[in-house]
């Protein structure tokens, strides 16, 4: 089992999760983070660190978030690894609870 970053991360991109990852499996895009399923060791340390509650165990991924499993795998191959916390976007808190924002994902 791996962990998956879901829709809540879009336009929030908090990186608290990155700091606790022991294997550097996070990758950063313009307004979203993903987890590389091939690197994730299923430690779950990132889950409680996410202010947006955007990280799920693959088996616990809500039905409406299932597409994010494949999206994480795809984008992890394209985006650079992120290993240190960076500042969240200035408007991250405004986007944290917004639903249906998949169309805002920047590749």
Image (cartoon, grey):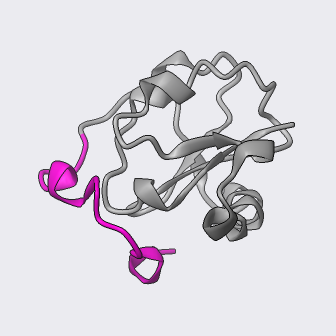
| Depicted 82 relative to depicted 67: above or below | above
Task: State which region is magenta.
Answer: 88-107
Answer left or right for 56 relative to 52.
right
Q: Where is residue 70 shown, x and y percent of the image?
A: 77, 65
Q: Where is residue 38 shown, x and y percent of the image?
A: 86, 42
> For residue 97, which quarter of the picture?
bottom left
The residue located at (31%, 53%) in the rendering is: 12
Answer left or right for 95 relative to 81.
left
> For residue 104, which quarter of the picture?
bottom left
The residue located at (60%, 57%) in the rendering is: 79
| Depicted 46 relative to depicted 53: above or below | above
The answer to whether one can see residue 104 in this image is yes
Answer left or right for 27 relative to 104.
right
Count of number-bearing discs: 0
Answer left or right for 22 relative to 38.
left
| Depicted 13 relative to depicted 75: above or below | above
The residue located at (72%, 44%) in the rendering is: 60
The residue located at (44%, 40%) in the rendering is: 53
Q: Where is residue 21 shown, x and y percent of the image?
A: 60, 21
Quadrant for the N terminus in the image: top right
Look at the magenta stretch and give its main secondary structure: loop
- In the image, 87 versus 7, the foreground residue is 7
């Amino acid at each position: 089992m791996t962990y998956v970053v879901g829709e809540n991360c879009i336009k929030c991109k908090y990186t608290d999760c990155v700091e606790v990852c022991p294997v550097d499996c996070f990758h950063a895009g313009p307004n979203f983070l993903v987890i590389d399923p091939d690197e994730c060791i299923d430690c779950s340390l990132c889950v409680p660190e996410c202010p947006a509650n955007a990280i799920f165990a693959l088996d616990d991924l809500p039905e409406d978030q299932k597409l994010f499993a494949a999206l994480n795998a795809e984008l992890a191959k394209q985006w650079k690894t992120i290993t240190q916390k960076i500042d969240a976007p200035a408007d991250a808190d405004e986007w944290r609870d917004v639903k249906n924002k998949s169309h805002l994902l920047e590749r």
